[in-house]
Amino acid sequence: MTKQAGSTTRRVRGSRTGRPIMALLDLLGRRWALRILWELRGEPLTSRALRTACDEASPTVLQARLTELREAGFVELGDGGGYGLTPLGRELCETFMPLHRFAERWKR
Amino acid sequence: MTKQAGSTTRRVRGSRTGRPIMALLDLLGRRWALRILWELRGEPLTSRALRTACDEASPTVLQARLTELREAGFVELGDGGGYGLTPLGRELCETFMPLHRFAERWKR
DNA sequence: CGTATTGCTACGATAAATGTAGCGCAGGAG
DNA sequence: CTCCTGCGCTACATTTATCGTAGCAATACG
């Protein structure tokens, strides 16, 4: 895949409108993106621990999402290894927490 | 594709764990799912108006997401035509509103 | 009848995700 | 040093999802 870090421009579908919410909605609307943020909400995880947490998702996509989320400034690779949320990423994750309660009521 | 409405069981990746948050994260982590909810946050839209709002996304995916979101109970097709959010869907959408403000600060 | 809109589908082309395997690198034993 | 283990990350063929264009049946209006 070699999805090498585009500089500033990245084909984020919804961003043609210029509205950042569209870019964010597109970024988070990719497979495993939301899940990764969710799994990282606690302590940092190594790439393999994250893979295990994400139900053995293929490392290809995980790596792709991780790169995108890192470029977006939500995730970072700690010095001692292991992925964790940046302050910004943690803030984003907080935004999603109400979703947990919602899901519990929704499950049917 | 013929993604016909499975009865109750649908291969929602994360739901193997039994945690509803995973099923929700997977459902919302599909292309255009978040965007559709977002565009429907106001008044109901016809399928074509929604397509226009979603940057001319292909009707194939839109229809697929719409079906999934309807099965999940978030979206409904009004009697006079046009898709709108159910009370539950509106509630879910409220959960996402903070994301808008977050995106504005994040845009860089 | 024609025209225009609705929700929805078919289908070939293209892009993305999956699954398995393995790379190079670093840190500890022995 | 060599062997071993785990790290982040990548290759690549297969499968799946999405795209883009076209068009269907049903309904409504004139």
Image (cartoon, coloured by chain):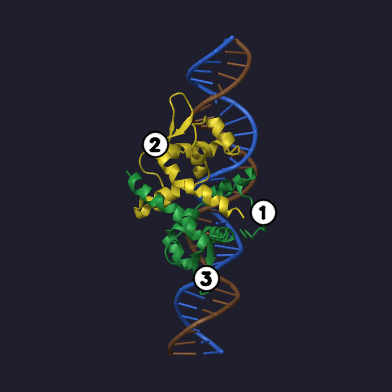
Chain colours: A green, B yellow, C brown, D blue
Q: Which residue is at 46% across, 23% downward?
A: B80
Residue B47 placement (x, y as % from top left): 53, 31
> How many numbered marks appear?
3
Q: What is the three-letter code of the residue carrying label 3?
A: Gly
Mark 1–mark 3 Cα distance, whole angstroms, equals 26 Å
Q: Is residue C24 above or below residue B106?
A: below
Q: Is residue A50 visible?
A: yes
Q: Which residue is mark 1?
A: A9
Q: Which residue is mark 3?
A: A78
Residue A77 placement (x, y as % from top left): 53, 68
Q: Which residue is mark 2?
A: B87
Q: Tell me if mark 3 has few (under 14), some (14-19) or many (20+) residues whose alpha carbon lies within 10 angstroms of its own.
A: some
Q: Is residue A90 above or below residue B98?
A: below
Q: Chain of mark 3?
A: A
Could you say which is closer to the camera, residue B94 or residue A43? B94
- Identify the element where label 2 is drawn: helix
Q: Is residue A32 visible?
A: no
Q: What is the three-letter code of the residue carrying label 2?
A: Pro
Labels 2, 1: front one: 2
- Identify the element where label 3 is drawn: loop
Q: Quadrant of residue B71?
A: top left
